[in-house]
Amino acid sequence: MKIPQNAKLIIHRLQNAGFEAFAVGGCVRDSLLGFTPHDWDICTSAKPEQIKACFEDFNTIDIGIKHGTVAIIVDKEPFEVTTYRVDGEYRDNRHPESVTFTSNLREDLARRDFTVNAIAYNDEYGIADFYGGESDLRNRLIRCVGNPDERFREDALRILRALRFASCYSFSIENKTAAAIHRNSELLNNIAAERIQSELVRLLCGDGAEDIFNGFRDVFAVFIPELAETFDFDQKNKHHRYDVFHHITHSVGLIESDPVLRLTMLFHDIAKPRVCTTDKHGSRHFKGHQLVSADIAREVLSRLRFPTDTIETCVTLIICHDVRFNGTLAQVKRVLNKIGVENMRRLFKVQYADTLSQSDYLRGEKLAKIDTAKAQFEQIMAENQCFSLKQLAVNGRDIIDMGVTGGKQIGRLLNLLLDSVIDGTLPNEKAALLAVAKEYSVKE
Ligand code: ATP
Ligand code: MG
């Protein structure tokens, strides 16, 4: 394993002062998997004050002295160094009441959540793996260190961490660990929304997200109970081959790995059960599900404390996800005017994933319509065709100069002109637009 120079420096200094020191956790796991770790955590038998004494000539930050963590800044890069510790009793399903320092690596590794995260390494000792982490890595398994029920009761966030690791690395979850996840899922009610949010996003963006959602849907229903309404909800409609839930999860798996896009797919059809009607032939319809789904998305995402711009983008895309492009440039321009360029690009991806998660019925035609709209969009952009007030050859100033007053009046007039330009009945040229504006304003 190749430890970067700066991490080596820290480990060697601690060793030279008579302490043990190892790289541990995510960095060892990722290295063994052949990935480049995003950071290197170090554990040591040195107590926090001893750590600081070893690095008096470096900048250090007390991240959690009580928990034994000191960050050492080497070449502007922080390295977290944590004293070997044993966690005390957990009373709130999240934090230990106290921590005790220990000089025994094996005890420190025992408090870690999963076997694959409980491997330590240094160049002198090699790999320290007391809980079968290497073998689980080889078999691509997430397994708790120790008794899984106890571990999830101590800290319920581990439930989502397990699902996140499984999703991001396409690992399976070992049977006993999986059973304990199902048994203890309600404990997630005790976990702060912000923590759930960050695990959820990473999990959603993993390659294995679809499988994890399908296999552990009861867990997601704990903090998104609205999702449970879609479970086994038969769409009874020729456009669909999956029930609502499996349609949703399949579309999540199909869209590119981007938080906003994956969240959009997760919520795009969530309201279908609420608005469902059945016609005389027994087919189901979901009129208006876009708007209600957008409302539910807004509520859930706010509850999980997502940033406002994430919420607004998802809501916009969910509202538009079912726009049926009809082949006209004017329609593409109107949608563009409403949602903007960046969301337009996203909308095509959303529609692709949505369509590919439906049945084969008319699939070719549906995809062709998206392709046409996309080509038209590219043309509009390349030719800088007018689709918004900003691009209109006249502005508010010009209308005021004509003698029209009142913001509402001016806005109405400009939008009438924009409509005609978008429809192609007027050229986007100042003289022509002003002439028509005069006519309108006289009429009014
Ligand atoms: P990544 O940084 O990619 O999210 P990681 O495994 O490094 O993965 P961190 O949250 O950085 O995750 O934690 C570092 C290490 O601390 C983990 O590898 C694990 O050994 C331990 N750890 C983190 N969170 C917990 C927890 N909730 N319960 C037990 N051990 C944990
Ligand atoms: Mg880490």
Image: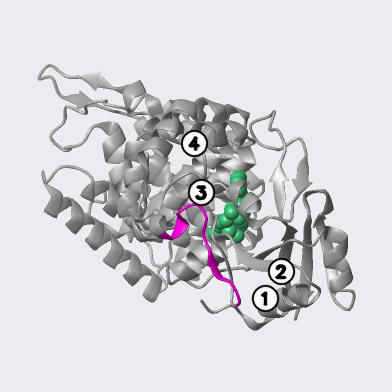
Residue type at the position of mark 4: Pro
Q: Residue at x 43, y 60 (%)?
A: 134
First in residue order: circle 3 vs circle 1: 1
Q: Amino acid at mark 1?
A: Ala
Coordinates of residue 88 in the picture (x, y in percent): 72, 37
Residue shown at the point (35%, 30%) measured from the top left: 288
Q: CA distance from mark 2 to mark 1?
A: 7 Å
Q: Is residue 238 magenta?
A: no
Residue 119 appears in view: yes
Cα distance between the residues tagged 3 and 1: 23 Å
**Pointer 3: what residue?**
114
Is disc 4 surrounded by few (<14), some (14 to 19) or many (20+) residues within 10 Å? many
Dots 3, 4 in contact, CB < 8 A: no
Considering only vertical position in the picture, is 317 above or below 236?
below
Q: Of the residues shown, which amino acid type is indicated by label 3? A: Phe
| Residue at the image position 65 percent from the left and 57 percent from the top | 105
Q: Nearer the viewer, residue 372 or 143?
A: 143
Q: Is mark 4 within 8 Å of ligand 1?
A: no
Marks 2 and 1 close (CB-CB < 8 Å): yes
Q: Nearer the viewer, residue 61 or 232?
A: 61
The earlier-in-sequence mark between 3 and 2 is 2
- The Cα atoms of the two marked residues, 3 and 2, are separated by 22 Å
Residue 420: name its quadrant.
bottom left
N-terminal of the pair, mark 2 or mark 1, is 1
* Image mark for residue 148: 4
Please identify the residue farthest to the top as the structure is shown: 280
Which comes sooner in the sequence, label 3 or label 4?
A: 3
Whether residue 125 appears in magenta in the rendering, the answer is yes
Q: Which mark is residue 7?
A: 1
Which residue position is annotated with label 2? 79
